[in-house]
Image (cartoon, grey):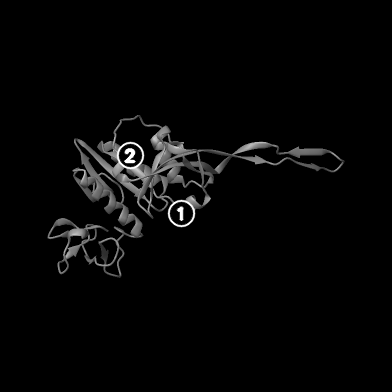
Amino acid sequence: MLKSSLDGKAIEASVASRGQLFLCPQCHREVILKQGRIRVPHFAHKPPSDCTWAAGETTAHMLAKAWLAEEMRRRGIPTEVEYVLDTLPGDRRADVASWVGAIVLAFEFQHTSIGLEEIEARAFAYARRGIAQLWLPFIRPSVFEAGEWRGNGVDRYLFVERYAARPFERWVHGLNGKEGMWMNCPSDQTMWRATLKGHQYYVNESTWYEEGGIENSAGGYFKWSKRYRELSMYGPYQLNSLGLTFRQRQAHRAA
């Protein structure tokens, strides 16, 4: 976790000093400040701990939150990491929250798979509160290994013909509609604009004979895959080259 409580006030690990009593915002037990040679200053529970506030959080996830918050603050936009919203289910935290004029914007990085019920509950809670939201799935390294570059110049993109899109990625893509989705590459903290389309595969024709010499055949047609999508990724973009726009939309059922 990037934030803890000190004397009843929130403090980030990047500006904290050792030798003080830091408490977990959820379980209120003591946490340890970890700085120095590690890549991301953060707080960790003293073992053993059953607190789920930061369970399973990766270094890449913490780095992405710190990186995004730093860029938003550089732009003069008030920003908090791990911002608690009482209307949210579960851990109630937005990874990063920014106040852009009268608009509250919640950023959610998604490194590991998340159940559709959980992501929908959080998204609907944001919507009920009138909070803008941007979900940012992490790109898996295998995507770059499986992809091939197509197009030229500004139209160049990385294409993966058979991409096993995780359910939450399909949900995020559906949430954004035709605009696709933004994805984050944790290895170099770049952003990519991605679109998903249905993938078709060819079912080979086959012939067999039943008893009595009756000939049967099947296949010889294209079929839509339930597992795979065609992924097109445009980028990479540095975060400081991207702007923010907001729009209201009507609820719809994600594909």
* Up/down of 148 relative to 42, above or below: above
Sequence-earlier tag: 1 or 2: 2
The amino acid type, in three-letter code, at marker 1 is Pro
Classify 10 Å Cα crowding around label 2: few (below 14), some (14-19), many (20 and above). Answer: some
Judged left or right of residue 115, residue 36 is: left
Q: Where does residue 162 sit, x and y in percent of width and height?
A: 55, 45
Q: Quadrant of residue 87?
A: top left
Q: Is residue 51 left or right of residue 162?
A: left
Question: Label 2 near label 1: C-beta < 8 Å?
Answer: no
Dot 1: what SS?
helix
Horizontal placement of 140 versus 74: left or right? right
Q: Residue at x 52, y 42 (%)?
A: 229
User: Badge 1: how crowded within 10 Å, few (<14), some, or many (20+)?
Assistant: few
Amino acid found under the numbered disc labelled 2 = Phe
Q: Can the viewer see residue 93 in this picture? A: no
Q: Give the CA distance from mark 1 to mark 2.
A: 31 Å
The structure residue drawn at horizontal position 33% and vertical position 41%, both measured from the top left corner, is 134
Task: Name the front one of labels 1 and 2.
Answer: 1
Query: For residue 194, what is the image quadrant?
Result: top left
Residue farthest toward the right in the current orientation of the protein: 212
Task: Give the residue at mark 2.
Answer: 124
Q: Position of residue 239 (x, y in %)?
A: 31, 45
Q: Which residue is mark 1?
A: 141
Q: Is residue 195 visible?
A: yes
Res 203 quadrant in image: top right
Residue 77 image position (x, y, % from top left): 20, 43
Q: Quadrant of the N terminus?
A: bottom left
Judging depth in this view, the residue of 47 and 140 nearest the camera is 140
Number of labels in the image equals 2
Q: With respect to residue 131, does 64 lie above or below?
A: below
